[in-house]
Image (tube, rainbow, N blue to C red):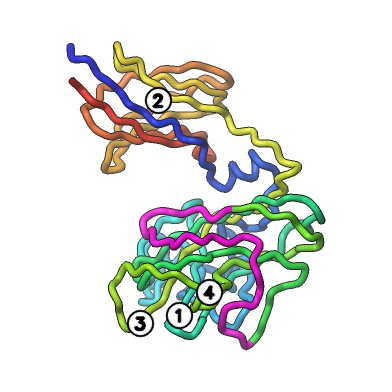
Amino acid sequence: MRTVKVLFAIVLARSLLGSVANAYGQNLVPNPSFENFDTCPLYTAQFYRCDIWENPTSNTPDYFNECWNEGWYDSPDVPINRFGSEPARTGQAYAGLYCQYSGVNGREYISVKLNDTLVAGSRYCVEFFVTLGDSTWGGINYMGAHFSAVPDTMSDYYFNLPFQPQIEDTTVITDTTGWVKISGTFIAQGGETYMTIGVFKPDSMLTYDSIQGDGSVRYTYYFIDDVAVWNCDTATPTYPNFTLFPNPSNGEFYISGNFPEATHLLIYNMLGQKIGESIALPTGHNLFSINLELAQGVYYYEIVSPTEQLTEGKFVILKY
């Protein structure tokens, strides 16, 4: 029998939005993944059909949902729509907005009233996820979030809002195939009740990275999903500490951790095809093993509960 050597990566737990609320305290953002709506959108530019969220300017952010089945060209469907192909990070819906028009500081934003007013002197954690539309010209930086005591509403306004966001990411985001996390913390002044998401810098301060060449029409469009705000000072992380490691002598994978009820280990190949799954792992602190016959190559794993992804990572099998 040939020896199997396994190199593996232990990855810090990355949550879906539900686990953020559960692990780090109350999420102050209502309808955080845009799942709730009053009427299914017939076409893009109908963000007003998404419950609770608002459009603060005269431009028209978009609402995308799997419920769409009307057959219009201007499709607001999930995962395939007029701006690209992207499954929702959570559920079946997400928002979308133009973050830059060619040469005119054109912007779209989305805003929401939080479930509670922020407390002066408290530190708040913020995160949301974005991905670049496939049909966009290129990516930009300075995606951010602004918190205010009154709405950032400016009627008959189409340009970058003149506010300094508390959360701002300087990375140029060009990923069109996965969700990129925007995150940060800030100290509340007190009284902040509203949150607005978008790009607040003018075109002259942005950095551009084209993915479609120099095209005559330049614009940047991002999808947005899973928005969370919570009080960092009062929340205590409760993520289980999972470790995945191999037994080189017999090819078994051992998983150590504090498992919620009905937790499973899933193994995928490089094509994203599931090639192995454990039975439900014993609840509580346990050491559990699963035996798989794997060829040489790179593999990915997830540890999941019925409601959330608990952690993920990859490992490499080298046979010699």
Tell me the CA gap for discs 2 and 1.
Answer: 49 Å
Coordinates of residue 289 in the picture (x, y in percent): 41, 17
Coordinates of residue 189 in the picture (x, y in percent): 79, 60
Coordinates of residue 53 in the picture (x, y in percent): 63, 67
The answer to whether residue 182 is above or below residue 111 is: above
Tell me the CA gap for discs 2 and 3.
Answer: 50 Å
Q: Say few, some or many: other residues with alpha carbon within 10 Å of mark 1 (under 14 / 14 to 19 / 20 or more).
A: some
- Please tell me whether residue 291 belongs to the stretch shown in magenta: no
Q: 81 and 211: which one is in front? A: 211
Coordinates of residue 16 in the picture (x, y in percent): 53, 45
Tell me the CA gap for discs 1 and 4.
Answer: 13 Å
Q: Is residue 284 left or right of residue 221?
A: right
Overall secondary structure of the magenta stretch? loop
Q: Which residue is mark 3?
A: 217
Q: Earlier in the sequence, mark 2 or mark 1?
A: 1
The residues colored magenta run 156-183
Q: Amino acid at mark 3?
A: Val
Q: Which residue is mark 4?
A: 61
Q: Earlier in the sequence, mark 1 or mark 3?
A: 1
Q: Which mark is residue 278?
A: 2
- Looking at the rendered image, the disc whose residue lies closer to the viewer, 1 or 4, is 1
Q: Amino acid at mark 4?
A: Pro
Element on which disc 4 rests: loop
Q: Which mark is residue 101?
A: 1
Residue at image point 57% right, 48% down: 17
Element on which disc 3 rests: loop
Residue at image point 36% right, 77% down: 73
The answer to whether residue 19 is above or below residue 282 is: below
Element on which disc 1 rests: loop
Q: Amino acid at mark 1?
A: Tyr
* Residue 106 appears anywhere in the view: yes
- Looking at the rendered image, the disc whose residue lies closer to the viewer, 2 or 4, is 4
